[in-house]
Image (spheres, helix red, strand yellow):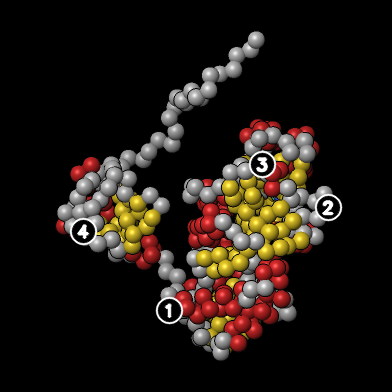
Amino acid sequence: MKLAILSRAPQAYSTQRLRAAALDRGHEVKVLNTLRFAIDLSGEDPDLLYRGKLLSDYDAVLPRIGNSITYYGTAVVRQFEQMDVYTPNTANGITNSRDKLRANQILSRHDIGMPATTFVAGRNDVRGAIERVGGAPVVIKLLEGTQGIGVILAPEAKVAESIVETLHSTKQNVLIQRFIAESRGRDIRALVVGDRVVAAMRRTASGDEFRSNVHRGGTVEKVTLSPEYEAVAVRSAQIMGLKVAGVDMLEGNDGPLVMEVNSSPGLEGVERATGLDIAGAVVDFIANQVAFPEIDVRQRLSVSTGYGVAELLVHTNADLVGKTIKESGLWDRDITVLTLHRDSNVIPNPRSGVALEPGDRLLCFGKLEEMRSMIPERRKRRAKVRKLPKEPLQTEG
Ligand SMILES: Nc1ncnc2c1ncn2[C@@H]1O[C@H](COP(=O)(O)OP(=O)(O)O)[C@@H](O)[C@H]1O
Ligand SMILES: [Mg+2]
């Protein structure tokens, strides 16, 4: 394949390793400076210029977009996507994961453990926010910090309030997060490539530092992850839309707590700690995927007017329960079942003989009008009256 690595640091360890891994495997590879691209929308098809000349054809692109050029970098990646060049990390995936709040919001509906997090704008709401995440000490984070810079541990509510106020006064948005004391300055970095964890390490902060980033003096050692940690890492990367990612997790009392998903994970620490050829795994994965550029299915399928994608819940359509897909009558209504979600399993292209069970969710493509009548009313988020706790309420005296 012909691979472009987008990077502004051709000499950096990760770039060098990726380039060498591609060459070793007989691929053609170029490291291209992200900021030397020009996006050209003047012709009939979307194009890219590099150093002023029309870019030659590439099979794949591996973006390594630094935090300081997220906007420009993702625009270049998006342009490659428009040109049907395969990228393991989409512009959307990079954008979503880069902003810690945005990433938390997206992960939060997917049953992924995360440290309790809250986001407020005004000084009047800071005290309540600190209490909601469990009170001081709390962690305060800039939304787009990296390498541990912009992550502060505030020991007391008063201090936290003044830090947040100070940052707000300089127009910086911050999130307020529960301090996970039990992780004791340690965290796990899992390298996800495709749908598996190819390597993992534990990072330990030095001295009385609580941030375990290598740039903050943290040390690394290799670890073997439990299936639970592996599954959470892979799912987090998938939800973000990243096929190459570094997923950071704290070891909470009840299992993994995802802090962030990095779209350009550094390879040096983790290759040294594990002795594994991670660059090679990344290149091999890309070479395997080249024939499958990322497609925005929803957008493409919605192009024919009146058709679209929707999710049908079997239990709210009682007449579906117990029937096979063939008997369900969906086909007669011009509705195709793309996937069947049952518990945490996904059955792609389910056979017509599969019997539907209560709780099944069907991802369907078809006439929107037909499907609309089958989609349940939006559920109320929360019952108005809260249930009493199981334990009797404490009374004084
Ligand atoms: N809520 C938290 N509780 C305990 N430690 C944390 C928490 N959030 C971050 N840390 C520590 O700080 C480090 C940096 O935080 P992170 O959110 O990953 O920011 P960055 O993008 O700068 O790496 C983490 O690797 C972890 O060691
Ligand atoms: Mg981090």
- Residue at the image position 55 percent from the left and 59 percent from the top: 230
Q: Of 257 and 199, which appears nearest the observer?
A: 199
Name, please, the residue furthest toward the top. Answer: 397
Element at badge 4?
A: loop
Q: Which is closer to the viewer, label 1 or label 2?
A: 2
Q: Earlier in the sequence, mark 2 or mark 4?
A: 2
Label 3, on which residue? 178
Circles 1 and 3 in contact, beta carbons < 8 Å: no
Inspect the image, locate mark 4, and give the three-letter code of the amino acid beneath it: Gly
Q: Which is closer to the viewer, label 3 or label 4?
A: 4
Inspect the image, locate mark 1, and give the three-letter code of the amino acid beneath it: Ala
Circles 2 and 3 in contact, beta carbons < 8 Å: no
Image quadrant in which you'd find residue 130: top right
Number of disc labels: 4
Label 4, on which residue? 353
Label 1, on which residue? 291
Circles 4 and 1 in contact, beta carbons < 8 Å: no
Label 2 crowd (10 A; few <14 / some 14-19 / many >=20): few
Circles 3 and 4 in contact, beta carbons < 8 Å: no
Inspect the image, locate mark 3, and give the three-letter code of the amino acid beneath it: Arg
Element at badge 3?
A: strand
Label 2, on which residue? 207
Query: In this view of the protein, can residue 293 be seen by the observer?
Result: yes
In the image, is the residue at mark 1 within 8 Å of ligand 2 by its beta carbon? no
Above or below residue 333? Residue 288 is below
- Residue at the image position 64 percent from the left and 37 percent from the top: 133
- Residue at the image position 71 percent from the left and 43 percent from the top: 181
Quadrant in which the C terminus is drawn: top right
Q: CA distance from mark 2 to mark 3?
A: 21 Å
Inspect the image, locate mark 2, and give the three-letter code of the amino acid beneath it: Gly
In the image, is the residue at mark 3 within 8 Å of ligand 1 by its beta carbon? yes
Q: What percent of the width, then of the height, locates residue 391?
A: 53, 22
